Image (cartoon, rainbow, N blue to C red):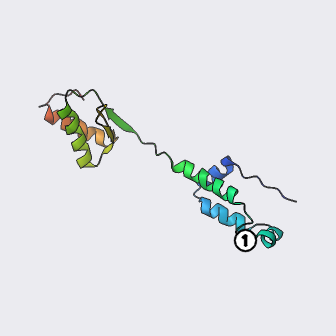
Amino acid sequence: MSVGMITRESVRGALQHGITAAQIISFLRANAHPQCIATSGAINCLPITVADQIRLWEDERRRMDLKDAYIYSHFESEDEFQGVCDYAQERGILLWANAQQKLVIVNEEGHEYVRQWYKRSKGGETTA
């Protein structure tokens, strides 16, 4: 008799090696015990809750995408905030902005572009 245990860690390990949840589920169904397949059918031999949990563990990995970024705050004016927002949006470097809190987050590559833009808009001053 052989017994296997599916754990979050084992599924995450497979996912990190490029195996998808669909492939894991397909493998488990294809290699189910013949008696299980005869009793429950090829699809239902793997409980739906198990298949769902494997998919949830895969989705968990996609939930957040970490990136290096720069945050800009404490703008001197609404125009300055809006200028940085507009510039970052046009360049495709804006990750997030909040007008109420006057916060702008740009990707790592965009930081130098914003610095140069700020320098030009301030007439050569470098305070960003």
Q: Is residue 128 left or right of residue 10?
A: left
Res. 30 image quadrant: bottom right
The image position of residue 127, as x and y in percent, is 22, 26
Exactly how many numbered labels are in the figure?
1
Q: Residue at x 29, y 42 (%)?
A: 110
Indicate the quadrant containing the C terminus: top left, top right, bottom left or bottom right: top left
Query: From the image, which quarter does the N terminus lie in?
Result: bottom right
- Give the residue at mark 1: 42
Instruction: Name above or below for residue 72 compared with residue 45.
Output: above
Residue 11 on image: x %, y % = 65, 52
**Residue found at the far left of this picture:** 123
Q: Position of residue 23 (x, y in %)?
A: 62, 64
Q: Secondary structure at mark 1?
A: loop
Label 1 sits on what residue type?
A: Ala
Residue at 72% x, 71% y is 42
26 relative to 7, above or below: below
Q: Is residue 58 left or right of residue 32?
A: left
Task: Give me the residue at 17% from left, 34% from top.
Answer: 79
Q: Is residue 16 left or right of residue 113?
A: right
Q: Residue at x 75, y 67 (%)?
A: 31
Residue 16 in sight: no
Other-residue count near label 1 (Cα within 10 Å), few / some / many at <14 / 14–19 / ≥20? some
> Up-down: is 38 above or below 20?
below
